[in-house]
Image: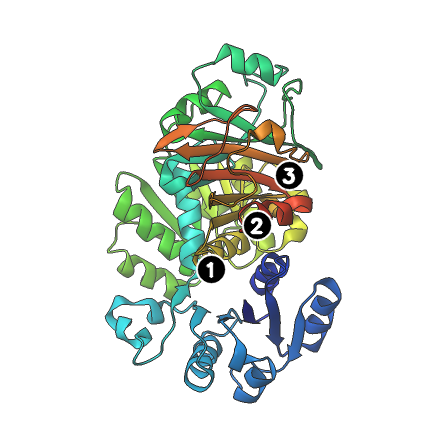
């Protein structure tokens, strides 16, 4: 498939990284920054074009006449829209994706704007909305560092930290399975400082570990309890940052969980008034700087269940989270856009790190993957990926016991759904055509996992 990606920021770079690993994809990236293009040409097997993505001459040079898809993820909404329009009108590109940040473009009142007759964009991604959904999902499952619903919500991948009170620390995984034989759970990975462990049955979890595990939805609360997490759902929440993410998150909470009390801290006084009106006074909006401890006192932070920092400033998000923890806030969720802070965060008293890049890329990949691979989820700073896929008749993993697949260390078939039933697979499990399979893979073996779901052609 020939794909043009407009914009080589964090999102564009990540999408190119995913798609360029597939041998059948021919990827061209367009960006006006010559340094970014030079760097990505050195890192990946892609074509790089320097220029403005909305310019017909540049799109022609990028091969738009032969392209199957254009993904416009520059930092400018208008450039993304025009690039898609030019790709459609002049070059007949069949599939068009655009990232749009301005809420005005997303207003249902103007939905006809993106119809096939006007501006034919097939899929619109709003990073602010996706990040808000990601955070809201974490709020609904307290005690977790990461929450990813899988298989249409029938199963979950969650990250949990092993605290001092965790009942199963220093317990070998084989003992864990014997202690809770009726609990459908599979341990996928353990983060121990900077080390990533893909455990076997003899490994054990230690205090301070962050454990990524798979379980079916009806067992989720019990699994968290086994790991010592019995936290109640948050009732009092403080949101720092009243931008588009903060507003979207507050609106989701108001609409879906109206029993939660919300306070928003917004530095800009005019924006604070707008937020109060937009939320119909269903949230208390405070105007002030979250790095000032007095504003936290006004927000009664010491009696708050959770603080969520979603400003555009990573450093401000980190510092305000630490101040809130110092003042007694039970849990902090911190938006971090720059991957360079990931290792720092793990050593600080911050409960949950939220990546806007991961939320956006996952949603785009979900649209792109219309074939066997239904979805890809990137885990914390990209140390591993989770694939959801439907097994085809000629797949190399079909009709073979898992033990005979000789999966490399770092690849785990975590769960599958067979004939509507959730199955925790073991070595003697045979995967059948049509099964919905969930696989965890480290970065080194993602290409191999993708090949599992490609077609094999038998030549006779």
Choose mark 1 or mark 2, whichever is in front. 2
Label 1–label 2 contact, CB within 8 A: no
Q: Position of residue 268 (x, y in %)?
A: 43, 63
- The residue that label 2 is drawn on is 458
Please provide percent x and percent y for residue 128: 43, 59
- Give coordinates of residue 204: x percent, y percent: 64, 19
Which residue is found at the position 57% from the left and 38% from the top?
Answer: 440
Q: Is residue 38 left or right of residue 241?
A: right
Q: Report whether 167 appears left or right of 50.
A: left
Q: Is residue 401 above or below residue 437?
A: above
Q: Residue furthest front?
A: 460
Residue beneath label 1, please?
Answer: 368
What is the basis of the colouring in this image?
rainbow
Q: Does dot 2 land on a helix, a strand or a loop? A: loop
The answer to whether residue 376 is left or right of residue 411 is: left
> Can residue 158 be seen?
yes
Within-10-Å neighbours for mark 1: few <14, some 14–19, many 20+: some
State the separation of the CA atoms marked 3 and 2: 49 Å
Viewer-closest of 1 and 87: 1
* Residue 325 left/right relative to 445: left
Q: Nearer the viewer, residue 209 or 70?
A: 70
């Amino acid at each position: 498939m020939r794909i043009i990606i407009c914009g080589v920021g964090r999102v564009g770079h990540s999408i190119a990284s995913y798609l360029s690993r597939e041998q059948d994809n021919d990827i061209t990236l367009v960006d006006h920054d010559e340094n970014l293009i030079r760097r990505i040409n050195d890192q990946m097997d892609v074509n790089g074009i320097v220029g403005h993505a909305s310019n017909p001459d540049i799109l022609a040079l990028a091969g738009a006449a032969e392209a199957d898809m254009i993904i416009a993820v520059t930092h400018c909404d208008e450039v993304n829209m025009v690039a898609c329009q030019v790709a459609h009108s002049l070059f007949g590109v069949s599939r068009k994706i655009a990232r749009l940040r301005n809420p005005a473009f997303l207003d249902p009142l103007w939905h006809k704007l993106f119809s096939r007759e006007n501006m034919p964009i097939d899929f619109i991604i709003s990073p602010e909305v996706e990040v808000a959904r990601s955070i809201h999902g974490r709020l609904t499952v307290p005690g977790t560092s990461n929450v990813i619903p899988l298989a249409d919500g029938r199963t979950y991948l969650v990250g949990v930290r092993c605290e001092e009170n965790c009942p199963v620390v220093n317990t070998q995984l084989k003992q864990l399975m014997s202690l809770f034989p009726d609990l459908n759970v599979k341990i996928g990975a353990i983060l121990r400082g900077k080390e990533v462990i893909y455990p076997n049955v003899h490994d054990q979890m230690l205090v301070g570990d962050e454990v990524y595990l798979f379980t079916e939805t009806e067992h989720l609360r019990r699994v968290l309890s086994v790991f010592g997490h019995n936290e109640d759902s948050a009732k009092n929440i403080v949101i720092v940052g009243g931008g588009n993410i903060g507003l979207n998150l507050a609106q989701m909470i108001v609409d879906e969980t109206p029993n939660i009390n919300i306070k928003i801290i917004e530095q800009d006084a005019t924006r604070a008034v707008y937020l109060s009106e937009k939320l119909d006074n269903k949230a208390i909006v405070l105007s002030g700087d979250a790095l000032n401890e007095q504003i936290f006192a006004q927000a009664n932070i010491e009696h708050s269940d959770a603080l969520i920092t979603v400003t555009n400033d990573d450093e401000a998000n980190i510092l305000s989270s630490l101040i809130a923890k110092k003042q007694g806030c039970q849990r902090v969720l911190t938006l971090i856009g720059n991957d360079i802070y990931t290792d720092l965060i793990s050593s600080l008293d911050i409960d949950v790190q939220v990546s806007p890049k991961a939320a956006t890329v996952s949603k785009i990949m979900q649209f792109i993957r219309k074939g066997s691979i239904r979805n890809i989820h990137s885990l914390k700073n990209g140390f591993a990926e989770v694939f959801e896929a439907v097994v085809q008749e000629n797949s190399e993993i079909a009709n073979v016991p898992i033990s005979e697949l000789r999966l490399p260390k770092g690849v785990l078939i975590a769960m599958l759904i067979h004939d509507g039933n959730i199955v925790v697979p073991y070595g003697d499990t045979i995967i059948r055509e049509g099964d919905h399979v969930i696989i965890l893979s480290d970065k080194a073996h993602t290409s191999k996992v993708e090949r599992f779901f490609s077609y094999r052609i038998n030549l006779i």
